[in-house]
Amino acid sequence: MPTTDSTTGLDPAVAAQRLSEEGPNELGISQRRTLRDMAWDVVTEPMFLLLLGAGAIYLAMGDAHEALILLGFVVIIMAITVLQERRTDNALNALRDLSSPRALALRGGTLVRIAGRDVVREDLLMIAEGDRIPADGTLLQAHELAANESMLTGESEPVAKQPSDKVFAGTLVVSGQGLLQVTAVGRHTELGRIGQSLDTIALQASPLREEMARLTRKLVVIGLSLCVLLVVLFWALRGDWLQAVLAGITLAMGVLPQELPVIMIIFLALAARRLAAQQVLTRRLNAIETLGQTTVLCVDKTGTLTQNRMAVAALCIAGQELDVQNLPAAADGSALPDAFHELLEYAVLASEIEPHDPMEQAFHRMAADHLVDTEHLHPAWSLAREYELSPQLLAMSHLWRDGTSAHDTVATKGAPEAVADLCHLPDAERAAVSTQAARLADRGLRVLGVAKALHRTQDTWPDAQHDFDFEWLGLVALADPLRPEVPQAVAQCRQAGIRVVMITGDHPRTARAIAAQAGIANNRVITGDELAHMPPQVLADQVRQVSVFARIKPHQKLALVEALKAQGEVVAMTGDGVNDAPALKAAHIGIAMGQRGTDVAREAAALVLLHDDFAAIVLAIHRGRQTFANLRQAMVYTLAVHVPIIGLALLPVLFGLPLVLAPLHIAFLELVIDPACSIVFEAEEGAANLMQQPPRTADEPLLSARHILLSVLQGSVVTAAVVGLYAWLLSQPAYAATASTAAFVVLVTANAALILPSRSNQPRWRSLWAGLTPVSLWVIGGTLAALTAITTVPWLSGAFKFVPLPALHWLLALMAGLALTVAFVANQQWLQNAKSAPQSPPA
């Protein structure tokens, strides 16, 4: 027995119970990983296998105690890695949930927007053009509804739908509106039966990932070559092959760059999670790295730059203009002069009965305030035919039937020039209309023309609006205020070297007025008609100079995006409609409007604004730049701290000194490096002037030769200090026993101290601690606390083969490591000066 009321929908409590009992509306093919999957990934990593290999060698040498301690570190590293992976996966899973198709459900008498996975059987769903249908169902209502079912049938032609027809999950509404009752969800849908998945969020190949893969491969080759060299040297010079293999494993553990791809994925996933908290959904993680390269931002006016809260501002009849913004409400029409009643009446008749469009909602609100007790509202009339807005004719008409009259009533509204053309106005009247519309548009108002016609009821309906005999009624002007944060956000874009381009369907004068208020260059405006007749070369020249495009038809957005891309620009593009999808897909970064946008636009886009807010786009660009800058600093630090590991593995063998590092020491160092890279640097706020810098060029690598040189310099400083100190202490009989302990204290302290200058690529002498996040303090403090424990607590230091240092010597070693900060900043300063020094002309 059905539990759904056709007027109120499913009870929310029933929906929640059904979701719990029957499961979410998913196809059962999930990308979510279990803890067991994550643990298996860790077990198969090279670092884990190297640790197990080192433990096996200790057992072969009869040192079971050392093997058990190493096994304990294996468990710790495995637990930390799994927790880190879980955090990353949770971030990605949250994004997948957000990016699933949305549904407008009627529950408990209220329309609510829910995730497609939360749809349950017997839900009542409102569907409209551009929506992706989230579940199978039966249509209860259909208004000129057609669906593209090619995903199921392979046929691309839209299928017209009538009440009682079936609709299917995954298919696309290409026109009209409807109300459906869900009959099947998840694996029980037609789509579920043929085993297809709509879960498309995954980290795809990108320039950054490819660069990381190349760097990792090079470091693996270098590392393995050094390991083989060390094993051969050790065996040749000392003759103990087990110790030689152990030394090789120690070096391999320190050199193999398993952190690099992990750090990159963590940075992108957490950046996406932070953007989601700012109401920007990242559907493709690659977009985050591209954000920092954006040079042109193409935006719509309505709802993006403006508040999308339309209100009727003025009515115009025969040159007479009435300002209605401060008109008091009066249901009997007394506050609104009689001459303007008919204009408002036909503006309402030309709108949807239950409108979603803000302009049409504004007409209905004004009619409710001024026409309720007049003869100008017609709740008993039935809508017999609707003529949709099209790129060829920017006007829409509704044909109404009252059931008694011999004539049907036709109401139309649209662009003033389009409606004037439908009315076949004489040139003089058309010029007067154009002048009046221009005057209103100069105030930043959205201007529409309204007209009426009669049609004999017994006649067949014409196919085109031009076949009606329309009579001009007047103009309606609507105000859509600029969002208060837009001028500042546009100014930020300008400072960041990003050109903001407005692309709108509005009147050119309206577009220019809003652009002026927003701070967008508006010395020239190009219309869609002008664009249609431009040769490609002229178009290329114009898009380089012009920043406002008006009366643009949806298909022309793609031409503008392609023209900008041909200029070498990195283009971010906003859109919301079905026709915007090609432009969104063609842009480097497609940005869909989450509130008014269609599912098709959202699926074509890389980013979705959950609130249609222009300032959120600027925040996303800042986050993209910040993530790339932080990732770069993390990589510089990671490479730098691996250099002394190589030095401490090779140099003692070459100089005939006892080895400093064993696998257990490398395991400890890995516990320091991983959180420093993936937590400390990811949480950094970045440089204060990030949005005052020009966009990053498309060919700029993550790590340039200068960055690699900086890593080598910083690592070499630590290597020289630690190896030099170690050799000197060994030469002093009084300190020889504690030499390895002191060297390890200096090594770990120097690595911790290197975090301070590495947080920025700018040398900072006086403000190393400035802007240090709590995360950084915890990591640095935790590292030094752990170092204190393993070098001073007898049972821990014994496990690491350390001889505890006297308190004074330990503090001196600590200060020696911290003192290297001076050298680190000096290296940064030297490279900065070398970069900015003028190049001498060639001889």
Image: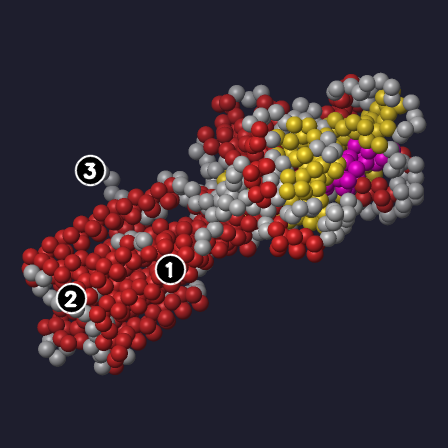
| Quarter of the C terminus within the rendering | top left
Identify the residue at horizontal 44%, vertical 59% (top origin). 683
Q: What coloring was used for the rendering?
A: secondary structure
Q: Can residue 705 be seen at all in this image of the molecule?
A: yes
- Say which of marks 2 and 3 sits in front: 2
Q: Nearer the viewer, residue 413 or 499?
A: 413
What residue sits right under mark 3 in the picture? 843
For marks 2 and 3, the one nearer the N-term is: 2
What residue sits right under mark 2 in the picture? 61
- Look at the numbered disc 2 and give the secondary structure of its residue: loop
In the image, which residues are magenta? 340-363
What distance separates the C-alpha of mark 1 from that of mark 2? Answer: 29 Å
Q: Label 3 is placed on what type of residue?
A: Ala
Is the residue marked by circle 1 packed among few (<14), some (14-19), or many (20+) residues within 10 Å?
some
What residue sits right under mark 1 in the picture? 81
Is 354 a magenta residue?
yes
- Look at the numbered disc 1 and give the secondary structure of its residue: helix
Is the residue marked by circle 3 packed among few (<14), some (14-19), or many (20+) residues within 10 Å?
few
What distance separates the C-alpha of mark 1 from that of mark 3? Answer: 55 Å
Residue 827 on image: x %, y %: 27, 58
Identify the residue at horizontal 74%, vertical 49% (top origin). 3
What distance separates the C-alpha of mark 2 from that of mark 3? Answer: 64 Å
